[in-house]
Image (spheres, grey):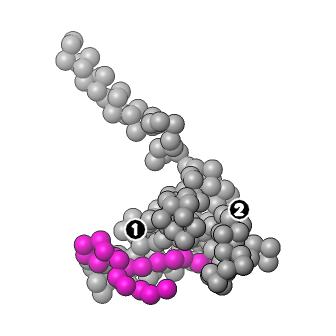
Amino acid sequence: MNHIGSILILLFVSIHLPFSTQSGKANRFQKSKTALYFESLGLVNVAEMDETISVKLMYAHPDNFTGRTLYEDLSEAYLHPDAAKAFVAAQKILKKHCPSYTLIIYDAARPMSIQQKMWETVRGTSKNIYVSNPAHGGGLHNYGLAVDVSILDEWGNPLPMGT
């Protein structure tokens, strides 16, 4: 009976542990407010369509041109369904020709509130040509139709792509 009790406790913990949270942070089964917002607009999580695609959103940490974290609750890349299908097709072509390489997404759909913060950072500077003015409707990122991408080699290093 003691052995069965231990197995039941282990089974209970293994089933419920993935659903718990640590330090109040969302776990992998809970979607962020931003992710839910994107999904309400019909955008799709690209990595859910192809798990071989790597995602490292540049604005999810302060190592970007603004010097601050802009995506507080987003770590997934969302795109318009047509853009996502095209991106997945590009990954398949890359894998066919260079099986050890993979695409990495640095930015995809972007909320207009983040676009505003980016614009405020570059407004009046020489960098303003790189950021669409949200007062004019933003840019293609705001509609899930643009993606900042590179290619990772077999060691996970990005290939030089320029700007």
Q: Which mark is residue 71?
A: none
Residue 57 can be seen, yes or no: no
Residue type, mark 2 in image: Ser
Identify the residue at image location x=55%, y=49%: 31
Q: Residues within 10 Å of mark 2 (few under 14, many from 20)?
A: few
Identify the residue at image location x=46%, y=47%: 28
* Distance from the alpha carbon under mark 1 to that under mark 2: 25 Å
Residue situated furthest top in the rendering = 1
Q: Secondary structure at mark 2?
A: helix
Residue type, mark 1 in image: Ser
**Which quarter of the picture shows residue 132?**
bottom right
Image-based side of 148 in relation to 124, left or right:
left
Which range is magenta? 145-163
Q: Secondary structure at mark 1?
A: strand
Q: Which mark is residue 113?
A: 2
- Is 86 covered by the magenta stretch? no
Residue situated furthest left in the rendering = 3
In primary-sequence order, the first of circles 1 and 2 is 1
Front one among 143 and 117: 117
Residue at mark 1:
54
**Which quarter of the picture shows residue 59?**
bottom right
- Whether residues under marks 1 and 2 lie with C-beta atoms below 8 angstroms apart, the answer is no
Question: Percent position (x, y) of residue 47?
Answer: 45, 64
Question: Percent position (x, y) of residue 89?
Answer: 45, 80
- Is 149 covered by the magenta stretch? yes
Identify the residue at image location x=25%, y=75%: 154
